[in-house]
Amino acid sequence: MITLYEMTYALTSAYGVYIIYKLMNIFFEEPRTTKTRELISYVVYYVLSSALFFFIRVPFVMMTANITMFFLLSLNYHSNLKRRMIFSFLAYMVLMVVEVMVSVATGYFHIEIFKESEYGSILGLVIVRIVSMVVVLTISRFKNVKKEIPTSNFSWVNSIIISFGSLYFLIIFMDKGNLEHMNVFLLVLWVLTINIMLVESYDNLYKEFLSKSKKLILQEQNKSYEKQLAIMQESAKNTQTLNHDIKNHIITLRYLQGNGEYDNMRKYLDNLESSVYDKKNFSSSGNYAIDSILNFKLQQVVDMGGKADTEVIIPKDITVSDFDMTVILGNLIDNSVRALKVSEEQGEISVRIKYIKSNIIITVINSFDGNVKYKDGRLQTTKVDSKNHGIGLLNVKEAVERNNGHMDIQYDEKKFKVTVLLPLQ
């Protein structure tokens, strides 16, 4: 007949499976299977682990089986072999050490790992689940640990040695059973702390790597915009030079016409036409950076069948650097163009740049498909390759902050609006 202790174990272990699920989702980022299959895998784990408890209940067998099953549960998520090995083991270690710590606290501190467990505290079973959830919630603050980054084999080997080493010494001391009660408790607490610190070290490692990677990507994109700005400025200068020399061109054409040199006149007109390609002039504020970026990029909208509308009213000379202005406008318009490409209706983009009370106010509004995603409170790209794209707004934010400015984002089902305020010195 089933005892009250066994009934309590069956009930609390169901909650324990949920705790394992939460822990796995802390260590691994994205499921690689359906929700149904994921659910089935955890149900199977519950059945198998319960069977081990009811029919075997030998600590060493249960420990080995659980480590194996934790690794199999990690197959639900996208990851590589090394990460599966270390984090499935870390997940087990954290929960196992909590169980041992609670068992010691409730008076059972001589665990014979090769013999059937005699632990029978109902209160201990309940406390184990409560403490386990508290520990998992504590670990959940490590937001970057699930990110995959290249890590040296030396780091992985060190992690495995630390984890397995702490488990080995814990088992040795617990099996001996000749330590004082408080010493055993402190030993278990020390092992738990080591493993949590190991998780924290990976979180910090990922955080540092992500920060460096993001800066490198932003630097590369900034270099690209810097080159693009130079090209556009050169194009604007050439056009301005051509407009300045238009009278001379007219004199030359009249001369060729007056002398009947129609073939040469035709060639001259062809050269002139290629130099002055008929493009719409979206901005003529006199600021090279703003005029170049708008005239260059908004032409893409027109070429793809969309509508582009601008209003630029600013002084010719402003204290915002050409580079920062190019980064801000370039990224905002690039994002808008990408949104227009996936919009089912004819795309529209509106750019307003005004000088108001010693501030430059930039407003970019574009139509889009209404698809917006947030992750960790930050706006994410809807593009498929989200790891290599979607940093446009981050780049804008960085340039805005360099100028002590402010950026605001608003959207509804059809329109996406970004407003940037840049105070002038």
Image: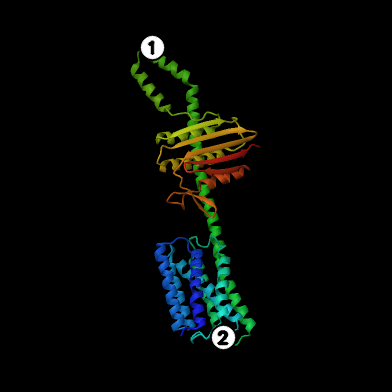
Instruction: Give the image quarter of residue 109.
Output: bottom right
Kind of residue at badge 1: Gly
Please tell me which of labels 2 and 1 falls first in the chain. Answer: 2
- Identify whether 114 is placed above or below 250: below
Mark 2 to mark 1 CA distance (whole Å): 113 Å
Q: Position of residue 67 (x, y in %)?
A: 46, 75
Q: Which SS class for mark 1? A: helix
Mark 1 packing: few (<14 Cα in 10 Å), some, or many (20+)?
A: few
Q: Which residue is mark 1?
A: 258
Q: Nearer the viewer, residue 245 or 368?
A: 368
Q: Which SS class for mark 2? A: loop
Residue positioned 38% across, 22% down in the render: 269
Q: Position of residue 210 (x, y in %)?
A: 53, 56
Mark 2 packing: few (<14 Cα in 10 Å), some, or many (20+)?
A: many
Q: Which residue is mark 2?
A: 110
Q: Is residue 237 visible?
A: yes
Q: Position of residue 24 (x, y in %)?
A: 49, 66
User: Split into 4 quadrants, where in the image is the C terminus?
Assistant: top right
The nearer-to-camera label among 2 and 1 is 2
Q: Name the outermost residue toward the top.
A: 258
Kind of residue at badge 2: His
- Identify whether 300 is placed above or below 165: above
